[in-house]
């Protein structure tokens, strides 16, 4: 797995296309972008699509002098659907490379489909550990992270704060398990319980009742998108916010805060980016 900045990746691949005869003949770069555009998790996908469109506007809708054609696909948070969308982009639309993917289980199905066809795959969110290990491929690049990086930082924060035990919750899929494993790599206290919920679940009342009965010193969770909005609201409504300190990754963010408002107060979050970072590139983007 190779990490690059978005602009470096885009310009680099466009330059590579310029060097080929077919690319010169078609005079455009065709990019297939797969994300989630439906259901409760579609809010994250809309942010991603809007960001792509904004970046293209900043680039004048061109890469290395070539016009850019974007083809968007909805994976519906389903690996089989994501693979079908990728196949269609490769065979019907004959894209030059495929980008996107929010969910790690979808990425594990899509990435080998794309690289197996001899095309570049550019991950923009999902970072399952397999792609940096047994599934590493020279045609796969990412502009984001490996899943366990950020939770490993949170584990160190909680370890340094002297928190002796913690209750852990995450969705039951590849990224959820990567997040928990990253957290446990640096947190050496006692795990009171490790609870995995259904991917896409929005009712956490049973799990929160169980949490209360365990009486942990703190709680660590990973619930992105719509799951995070539901979890934060219910955590606050259950009166747990003032009782058990909540630490999270990819849960309290620019997507969830406007929806949950005061329910996000007092939470701790580790992340690699924030809308209020004071640098020219970020301020232009925001």
Image (cartoon, helix red, strand yellow):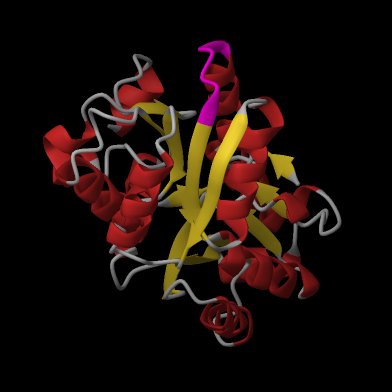
Looking at the image, residue 150 sits to the left or right of residue 19; the answer is left
- What residue is rendered at 54% in x and 38% in y? 7
- Residue 163 within the magenta-colored segment of the rendering: yes
Please tell me whether residue 73 is drawn above or below residue 169 in the rendered image: below
Quadrant into which the C terminus falls: top left
Q: Position of residue 252 (x, y in %)?
A: 32, 37
- What residue is rendered at 46% in x and 30% in y? 271
Is residue 104 among what the camera can see?
yes
Please tell me which residue lies in front, 162 or 264: 162
Please tell me whether residue 50 is drawn above or below residue 191 in the rendered image: below
Please tell me which residue lies in front, 24 or 173: 173
- What residue is rendered at 51% in x and 19% in y? 163
Q: Position of residue 276 (x, y in %)?
A: 29, 21
Q: Position of residue 231 (x, y in %)?
A: 29, 51
Looking at the image, residue 193 sits to the left or right of residue 47; the answer is right
- Residue 235 within the magenta-colored segment of the rendering: no
Is residue 4 among what the camera can see?
no
Q: Quadrant of residue 110?
A: bottom right
Q: Main secondary structure of the magenta part?
A: loop
Please tell me whether residue 78 is drawn above or below residue 259 in the rendered image: below
Please tell me which residue lies in front, 167 or 134: 167
Looking at the image, residue 133 sits to the left or right of residue 131; the answer is right
- What residue is rendered at 58% in x and 44% in y? 179
Q: Position of residue 121 (x, y in %)?
A: 66, 60
Range covered by the magenta-colored residues: 160-165
């Amino acid at each position: 797995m190779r990490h690059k900045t978005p602009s470096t990746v885009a310009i680099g691949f466009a330059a590579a296309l310029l060097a080929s005869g077919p690319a010169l003949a078609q005079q455009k770069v065709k990019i297939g972008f797969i994300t989630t555009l439906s259901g409760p998790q579609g809010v994250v996908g809309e942010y991603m699509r809007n960001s792509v469109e904004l970046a293209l506007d900043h680039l004048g809708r061109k890469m290395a002098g070539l016009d850019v054609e974007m083809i968007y696909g909805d994976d519906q948070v389903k690996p089989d659907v994501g693979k079908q969308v990728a196949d269609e982009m490769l065979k019907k639309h004959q894209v030059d490379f495929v980008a996107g993917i929010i969910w790690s289980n979808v990425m594990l199905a899509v990435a080998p489909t794309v690289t197996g066809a001899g095309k570049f795959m550019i991950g923009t969110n999902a970072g399952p550990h397999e792609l940096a290990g047994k599934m590493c491929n020279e045609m796969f690049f990412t502009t984001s992270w490996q899943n366990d990086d950020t939770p490993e930082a949170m584990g160190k924060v909680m370890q340094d704060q002297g928190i002796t035990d913690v209750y852990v919750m995450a969705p039951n899929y590849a990224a959820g398990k990567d997040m928990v494993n990253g957290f446990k790599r640096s947190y050496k206290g006692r795990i009171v319980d490790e609870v995995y919920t259904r991917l896409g679940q929005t009712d956490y009342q049973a799990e929160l009742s169980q949490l209360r009965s365990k009486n942990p010193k703190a709680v660590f969770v990973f619930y992105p998108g719509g799951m995070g909005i539901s979890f934060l609201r219910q955590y606050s409504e259950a009166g747990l916010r003032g009782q058990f300190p909540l630490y999270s990754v990819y849960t309290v963010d620019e997507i969830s805060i406007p929806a949950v408002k005061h329910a996000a107060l007092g939470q701790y979050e580790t992340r690699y980016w924030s809308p209020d970072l004071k640098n020219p590139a970020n301020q232009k983007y925001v």
